[in-house]
Image: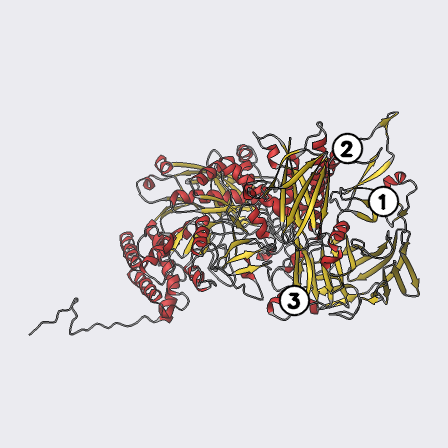
Amino acid sequence: MSKNRYPVAYPQLTEDVQHNLLPGISLKRLDLFLEGPYDGFNLGSTLDRVRLDDEDTVRMTIWSAPDIEKVSFHEGIEKLQGADAKLLKKGDLIGGSWSQHWVKVEIKIPDSFKNSCEPVVFEFDPSCEALICDVNGDPIHGITGGPNSTITAYPGYVEDRRIEQIIPREAVQAGTYECYIEIACNGIFGIGINGYRHHEPDMNMKYHLELADLVLVRSEAHALKIDFQVLKQLARAAEGERSSISRKALKAANEIMNVFRIDSQEVIDESIKQGRNLARSVLGSEVERLEDEDVRIWALGHCHIDTGWLWRYTHTQQKIARSWSTQLDLMDRYPEHQFAASSAQQYVWLEELYPSLFERITKSAKEGKFHPIGGTWLEHDCVLPSGESLIRQYLYGQRWFEDKFDQRAKVAWLPDTFGYASQLPQILRLAGINYFFTQKLSWNNINVFPNSTFNWVGLDGSQVLAHMTPTDTYNAQANYSELQKGMIQHKNLESTDQCLLLFGNGDGGGGPTALMLEKLRRLGSSSKKNPEIPTVRIAKIDDFFDHVAKKTKGGKTLPSWRGELYFELHRGIFTSQAKIKYGNQSMERLLRDLEYFATLASLSSSDYVYPKSRLDEIWHDVLLNQFHDVLPGTSIKMVNDDALEIYRRRTIQCYALLDEALDTLFPLGVANGHTKETSLAVLDGARLPRNQVTEIPSEWTSLLGEKINQVTSSTARVLGYLSSDIAGIGGLSTPANMNSPSASQDGDIFILSNSLIRLTISNGRITSLYDLSLERELISPGVGTDSGGLMIYEDYPLSYDAWDAEIYHLKMGREVLFDQVEIIANGPLRSTIRTTSTFGHSKVILEISMDALSLHGRHQNNNPIIRADAKVDWHETHKFLKFVLPLDIHCLTATYGTQFGLIERPTHRNTPIDQAKFEVPAHVFADLSEAGYGLSFVSDHKYGYIVEGNTMRISLLRSPTAPDVEQDRGYHEFTFGIIPHKKRLIESGVYKQALTFINPVHFKPVDSTVKLPITFTLVERNTDGIILETIKRGEDDFTSGKKGKSVILRLYDSLGGRTSATLRINGIKPRSLKWLNVLEEPEMFQHQKVNWKAQDGYVEIQMSFRCFEIKTLGIYLD
């Protein structure tokens, strides 16, 4: 008879009574072990072996700065030795808001601490932010005091409090320790009034010094605490009742609580040891490094620091030092730690203000642990800056990173920017960047973006491999739920199942913490034991994208998204903070003009030096203000005031530099000790042919001679008629066959007209816009109004006041009537009707004008322009002011200007995607055209538009109350235009005509015929869409060790058609010409030779463009 053998003995009889865990009780019980009503008896009571806070152990001296400006370490140390220093005690109040303080800390360490192997920690909690420095002033790490930040939807999710400093072992053995602490009286998210993060600052805050304790910690208790936190996360995971790992974690956590005892120190240590063993049965031990093929979650330490937002730029400088020094401290303790930080501007500040810390970061970067990323000057807004500004972000950023770190970014890094322009992929590829990261579209409030990893294709067909992490955050806490989201929410699992996990506290800085790294260790080891847990590894950002590119065969297996990445939230940013938007746009224009004329001056005069360093400084400040919370208008008033001061100061500098360049190009002769001013030259930095009325400073009236002119409503300016050529040189004249406009009144009906168009105002509205040449009425009843003019809307967004405008605001509009109408000018150059509207606490004056035309009839670039000069005294709250025209024009799409091109968007609301685009950004103009006819709105610094059905709207002003309670209240002046045109937009000449409308010219008194030493003439063969945007000196002309002179040209196709052109340059003798990328390097185009030939005194270059292509040409001179 055979014997059955069993691998394990199984008793026949038993008296045991076992049962399944009762989830309702066993899950709720977990809340009692770390906190709660039994905090004197649970694990939390055993974390310290000894805690001391007496003044003999910890002695502190504080000096408080007299104002809110940052004080250097050396000044702080000097003041701490003076009469204004005083003793600081635990429990004292420190303040007020934004104030700066230096504290000297002297610690005596008991002998009993020296004999212990446990860490000795100094816990310092000032309830605000602080930076601990050694006795030499070198930053050690940051302090984030006060309670953990709260997210209403996820209570207890964020753990950003960091108050502990591990005292070096040598100091413990010596028995004494000294350090200095810089205290900044603000929270990690500023000091929003009444605790509301996004509101204006509370200017009466004081902070308690809650802790200043010396602690001998029980390290295994701290480790068990983290074990338990991870087990608790696993036990409470989504769908946990059907998860093996979730049930095992729940059981282990309950068993840890079952064995825990606090009867004595020995019993505590033994029960903690048992508890850790129980945790390892689920979590495992530390695991070896996973290979790329085995990793699904690629974790990277990250710290998003908003360069300006709920705090000023100066506060950001401190946040950088606090956050980044903390990461170096963690790298010393966690060898696997990798950390990435973007924004050259932040590194520049660090090098200037914290040089020793910058040196340590440079060393860590060379070791491959601290990663400069992004390639930009900072994390810029993408929809409001000009195309050239976007290029400069990468030109300055990539070159700076290469100079300081000998590396360039491969990944564009814009996790928090409010939408992404359709030409960004082309700009990125031209900046040497193939990859793109964001997560912001996860905030969409209408549609879920359909991709996680995809090819993003721009207007011209350029693509970047894009990843939008399915974890939906750049501030991950390294929790299990985030790993789950990385898999469950990944939308492209058929192509790749890998995603990024950016862990670290951000927005206000802080970055990764030791707790996060500990959690990742446990999750990494547990994933080896439990296949339900996604494998996770800390890795480099470049390695992640390289791996995805390889696995998807260079992106061929990924879906493609073409065109803009429109952000379905924060639509109010196209209008908020009007003066900042004006400052940015005017600086962009001024820098373009300055670079052009300075380039000509530097090549024509040996006495003139191209102001490269000063231009760089100005550009850096312009790029700084393009940060994605500053230019959009979503910062506190202190930040806005700083930005406006930058624009004021830099504008003065630009005009001074421009005068120097123009004086070099057009020197005035001297006769009898006086300069000879005989005529007035008109200089156009945009280099556009013009025949138009222009405003002239009245100081130059004496130089107008017999040329026809007209006094304006402002005594500071007169009107003249300008004619200029493509070289940007022109003069004032009295044109032949000039058609003067007229203004007339018949009772309460006012009519403004020229030979092409007639505008009628009656009953306080624009009731007719009539094309005289076609005998066509353009005004037709539309959406929300039957007539043209101002409309005001109630503006109460759901969440983010300065950021958002919601779709329902369009249902809460009303017409604003012209209360007063009068004729204030009636030719010969300009006729003007002034309207005045008074409503609420505000008044709007619109001076609606038509100008003289030089020719009978309409031809390309001579469409009639109706000009509206607005003077607004704005004092509303939660109101949105727009100008509206309902038109008898029908088309399913409208066309909008964007950086280096055009974009079409629907005028209907068929789908949720269409419905989401109820307010959209545009540069220069928005246009509604049908076959044969159209109309454009034109503006220089108004960016919010929409065409709904047949109704066009341009957004003028908003009035939110948070985070700047005074946003846009006050006086504003701005101009917009209305251009009716024959043909569709791309055939009408409106694009270049709009550029002449928004780009003012410069005036220069001269004593002879004006002639430029170098001219650029562009002749197109099949379209009129090529724009020569930028003329500047080459970057390498001013690089140490490199010699030579070069000129850089930036051109682009603006209309979206394949085209050819000839560029003729007079006055130069080049030795070579090369196509360049936007970093001004030829390698990308080494196989594309420039087709050029030199003639006597000039050069001709043959060039062709694909749709919306951007080209950069380098001209190298002898």
| Category of crowding for the residue at label 2, using alpha-carbon neighbours closer than 10 angstroms: few (below 14), some (14–19), many (at least 20) | some
Tag 3–tag 2 contact (CB < 8 Å): no
Q: Residues within 10 Å of mark 1 (few under 14, many from 20)?
A: few
Disc nearest the viewer among 1 and 2? 2
**Circle 2 sits in a helix, a strand or a loop, which is it?**
helix
Q: Is 51 placed above or below 915 here?
A: above
Q: Quadrant of residue 864?
A: bottom right
Quarter residue 747 falls in:
bottom right
Secondary-structure class at tag 3:
helix
Q: Nearer the viewer, residue 1008 or 62?
A: 1008
Looking at numbered disc 1 in the image, what kind of residue is underneath it?
Ala
What number is the disc on residue 807?
3
- Give whichever of discs 1 and 2 has the lower sequence position: 2
The residue carrying mark 1 is 716
> Can you say which quadrant of the picture contains the C terminus?
top right
Name the residue beneath numbered marker 2.
663
